[in-house]
Structure formats: structure tokens, C-alpha cells
Amino acid sequence: MVDAMPDRPRKGRGAVSNPTGRFEPHQRAAVDDGWTRDNTDDPPPLQTVLSVDTSRKIIARNDSPDVPFDRSINPYRGCEHGCVYCFARPSHAYLGLSPGLDFETRLFYKPDTAKLLAAELRRPGYKPATIAIGANTDPYQPIERKLGLTRAVLQVLSDFNHPAGLITKSSLVVRDLDILADMAHRRLAHLCVSVTTLDESLARTLEPRAATPKRRLEAIRQAAAAGVPVAVLTSPMIPGLNDTEMERILEAAAEAGATSANYTLVRLPLEIAGLFEEWLRSHTPDRADKVLNRIRQMRGGNLYEASFGRRMRGSGTEADLLSDRFAAACRRLGLGPRGFVLDNSRFAPPPARGDQLSLL
């Protein structure tokens, strides 16, 4: 009988393993064929592979009561940041790939994002409302530095006077402050920066390829100084792991210039529950059971609760206490709720090539 090889953390990657997606007919496992070197050797690094996403529509719609927007744009599928808790991981199973290591190494990009967006905004009857950029995967993950798709999207939205809200945990966003500051001056843009922890050691394993906490705070500082309204997202809060940092994160963000805040409780749907437990037992084995038990206490005895209203905040005494702590800290620091009011009335598609110009 051939034994399966144990999964071990890889430097610079979040997930420990690469389990088969839930829609696949067969499960795969790596086995030791006798040629494997000593198990004390580090596993080989995984390279990031890019593929083209041929989607013909760029604006995704939702009717969730848990989020303050009904439309979003995600220039990328998969995310190289590798955050082990990422709620978008299960979406990779629809591509026949694993929500584990595949999600952070097998990435898809939409080269015609800006062109498709402009076409959708020109459709007769289109009614503007704030578009969230990065609601699923980070629009400023490392490959954005090379491809520039998010910047192209922002330029289109600016040209159309269309409101947008950015969500990121990358300091690369400061590259585009020239566009964002101009949009903010027209009440067309706001920025949400996720700061999960101030502990750089924890951040390195929890969010291995995201910007360090210091760089995220500096991004808040630079954006606020440029006149862009900024919210800090202390998300996700993981009981027993980073929840004790909530007040300190809010204080640091407020000092940097954030004017509003929000938080979510860690969400572990589908494959994420197993990936997260695997990460805990690999990186914090002494706390794994405590963390999982506390999550269950805030999720009605389970690791996940999918109902609207509860999936973001949890339920029970511990969840209520976390909510009360957040509210008290925001009152003390003068941080308002996330929910910037942007201006939809400015929307006006610019003339396209071949359009007849108005005489008025």
C-alpha cells in the first residue's frame, strides 16, 4: 500500500494543501513513490500561473442584504495574497480547480476589463450606483503591478463620472491616488483598507503575500492626505487569534486618517473550514482547538452559519460582546459606519468615436 504524503506549509503560500474541488468526480492525493527526499526538506516553491478569463461581462450583480452595494467588478479570479480564510476560495471549484493552493497560484485575469466596462456603462437604460472594486478578490494583488487592470477600470469610471468603492489590503493602491484623489474631489470614490492584525509575524502566515500591516496603515495615511475618504476594515476577526487586537487596529487606523470602520467575523463556508483548520494545526497547534471552539460558540455550534444577518457577525454572547467592543471603540475614536455617500448624479458617458456631437 502506498502512503499519502503529509501536507506541509510552503513559504509564501497560505493554504497548506490543495484538496480536490467539490465538483470533481475523483479525489487526488500526493503519494510517496520512493523518490521523495527526507520529509524534513522544505517542499518546493509553487510558481504563479496566469490564464486569460474570457468573460464577456464585467459587472457582477448581487442582492445580498449584508453588503452595501449591488454591483461589483473583479479584474482577477484567484488571489496571490493567499489569505487562508478568504471567503472567495470555494469559487475556484467552479473552474475545476482547488480552493487550496490552486486558488493562490492558478490565477485568471480579464484583459478586456476596461473595454467591457465601458460598453456596459454605455448600454441604454443603465442606471449608475456605486461599483465595488475588489469585493471578491483583491484588485491590487501582486500581478496588478504588471497588468494594470484595476488602474484601467478606475480611469474608465473617472471618465464616465461613475462612483466607485475600492476594497484592498495592498499598499499598491497609492499608485493610483492621482485618479482616486480626482474622483474623490467629485465625490466619486472612497477606499476601504483591510487591516487584520498589527502582528507582522501572524500576518506573514495568515496573509503571506499581502502588504505588511505597517504598509497598509501608510496607505491609509497617504490616501487620507490626498483627500480620499478611507474606511478601515478589521476583517476578519478570528476569536482566539486576532480579536484582542481590534481596538488597537482601530486606533492605529484612526491615527492614520481613517474616518469610518467596519468588521466581519471569520467566515468558513465549504472547503474553507478544512483549509483553515489545517492552517491552524500547522502554524498555531497550541491554539487550534481553542480557536475552533470559540468560532463554534459564535456560529450556533457550527463552524459556519450561512443565514443573512448572521453570517457576517455571528450570534450568541461572544458575538454580541465583539460587536459591543467594536461600537465602543468607534465611538471613542470618532469612527463612523462604513457607508460613504457618493454622487450618482454626475454620471455621463463621454462621447465615443463616431458619436454625433450635441449642438447644445
Image (spheres, helix red, strand yellow):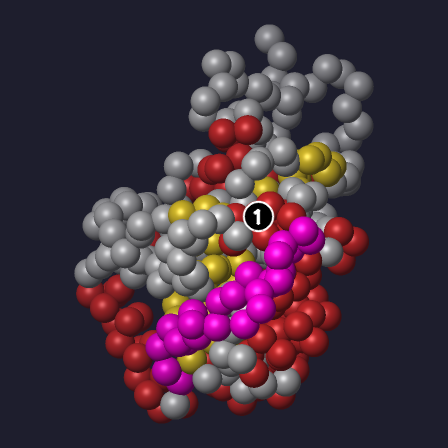
Please say whether residue 61 is visible from this viewpoint: yes
Pick the residue in front: 15 or 142.
142
Read off the residue under disc 1: 119
Residue at image point 68% right, 58% down: 152
Please say whether residue 196 is visible from this viewpoint: no
**Callout 1 amino acid:** Ala
Magenta-drawn stretch contains 353: yes
Q: Is disc 1 placed on a helix, strand or loop?
A: helix
> Is the residue marked by circle 1 packed among few (<14), some (14-19), or many (20+) residues within 10 Å?
few
Quadrant of the rendering where the N terminus is positioned: top right
Residue 328 spot, x, y in % from top left:
30, 84
In terms of secondary structure, what is the magenta stretch mainly? loop
Pick the residue in front: 88 or 320.
88
Pick the residue in front: 292 or 94.
94
Horizontal side of 43 relative to 308 (left or right) equals right
Residue at image point 70% right, 35% down: 51
The number of numbered badges drawn on the structure is 1
Q: Is residue 308 above or below residue 179?
A: above
Q: Residue furthest front?
A: 359
Quadrant of the rendering where the C terminus is positioned: bottom right
The magenta span reads 335-360
Residue 234 spot, x, y in % from top left:
45, 69
Q: Is residue 256 above or below residue 321?
A: below
Residue 342 spot, x, y in % from top left:
43, 74
Residue 178 spot, x, y in % from top left:
70, 76
Residue at image point 69% right, 19% down: 32
Magenta-drawn stretch contains 252: no
Residue at image point 25% right, 52% down: 308
